[in-house]
Amino acid sequence: MKAIIQTHYGSAESLKITQIDTPTPKPDEIQIKVMATSLNAPDWRLLRGKPFMVRLSSGLFKPKHLVKGTDAAGIVTAIGGNVKTFKVGDEVYADLADSGFGAFADYVCIDEKLAALKPKTLSFLEAASLPLTAITALQAVRDKAKVKAGDRVLIVGASGGVGSYAIQHCKRYGAHVTAVVSTGRIAQATALGADATIDYTRTPLDQVSEKYDIVLTINGFYPLETYKKLLTSTGHLVLVSSGKMSQILTITAFGPLLSKKGGQTYSGFLARPSGADLAHLSALIDDGHFMPVIEREIAFEDIPKWIGELEKGHVGGKIVAWVNQN
Ligand SMILES: NC(=O)c1ccc[n+]([C@@H]2O[C@H](COP(=O)([O-])OP(=O)(O)OC[C@H]3O[C@@H](n4cnc5c(N)ncnc54)[C@H](OP(=O)(O)O)[C@@H]3O)[C@@H](O)[C@H]2O)c1
């Protein structure tokens, strides 16, 4: 089968399209014929092996996982002996971040618990835009920030995959959403439901006087002092990501210590792939409460080039690619 592989850390040129053996499912696994995939920010971090910390899980000196790719939408082509939820022919989607990746290939095998039936109303290409980013946004909004009706939420970096899905989840929970985006992304954020926008190219956040119950940081970087000033006295900062790794490490390790009892709280956040959450997302989509945000459709062969573009940090929405069209 064809696959995009990586044998050493480096630039997008270290990715190669080649032929490898087709994987067969273990007892708890399903084999998926991948119809479509999408690109994610972690793709380039794993490509580079940077920051060095990512190598603790991805391989110290060379990548542990040969085939790249996190998001898969496709058809079940074989099942292991213990599989109960799926049958051959089911149309599914999955986030492979905790199962060795492998979505940039004709076939991948994963534990059945990580997959869900894809939304019936979406194409494979649309479904592939969702797993990692929409579930990250869901878990950050629902489980970590615990957004509820009436909350005033500030989303910093609201135009990428995670951000554009976070706007939609916050709106579903009845929050008032302010999206921090660049000038060209204001219309997209508003169309997705943002009640207000801040153009970060014109208004630095340290000049904003409004207060928010929740600040969700997904892209960009501001010092903790700036976020503290934006929060109400009992507000909650949830750091999904940051332009500075040192800030992620500080908040993840010391957030609970820095937080004040009965006052402001500061939390790091790590998403966990979940078939159950994907099934929940499918229901939301088929009921018309959530939609994919696709920026660009590219050819399978162009995936390495576009992972290089993602590293520059200014691709909004999601980039999707067909792996097999029939
Ligand atoms: N914690 C977790 O479990 C978890 C899980 C998945 C992903 N992540 C992380 O979440 C981050 C976001 O990922 P993503 O997929 O949404 O895409 P991304 O490629 O990191 O985001 C690109 C978007 O960010 C915007 N942006 C760039 N600089 C900005 C700034 N200074 N202020 C505000 N917006 C800015 C860009 O728009 P403009 O250029 O127009 O501003 C673009 O639309 C990544 O760092 C990723 O690694 C974390």
Image (tube, helix red, strand yellow):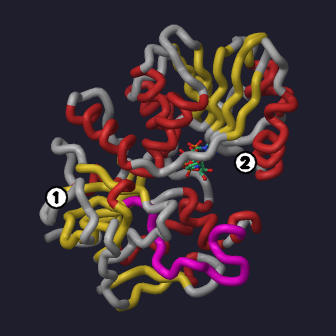
Q: Residue furthest front?
A: 82
Residue 322 sits above or below residue 266 on the image: below
Classify residue 238 by image quadrant.
top right
Q: What amino acid is at disc 2?
A: Gly
Q: Which residue shows up at 59% across the image and 79% down it?
A: 64
Res. 243 mark: 2
**Left of 266 or right of it: where is 216?**
left
Q: Nearer the viewer, mark 1 or mark 2?
A: 1
- The residue drawn where x is 56% and y is 68% is 308
Residue shown at 21% from the left, 46% from the top: 122
Q: Secondary structure at mark 1?
A: loop
* Stretch in magenta: 56-71
User: Residue 82, image x and y in percent?
Assistant: 28, 65
> Is the shortest distance between ligand 1 and the CB of mark 2 under 8 Å?
yes
Task: Name the residue type under label 1.
Answer: Asp
Q: Quadrant of residue 155?
A: top right
Q: In which quadrant will I find the N terminus?
A: bottom left
Of residues 263 and 296, which is closer to you in this image? 263
Tag shown at residue 90: 1
Q: How many marks?
A: 2
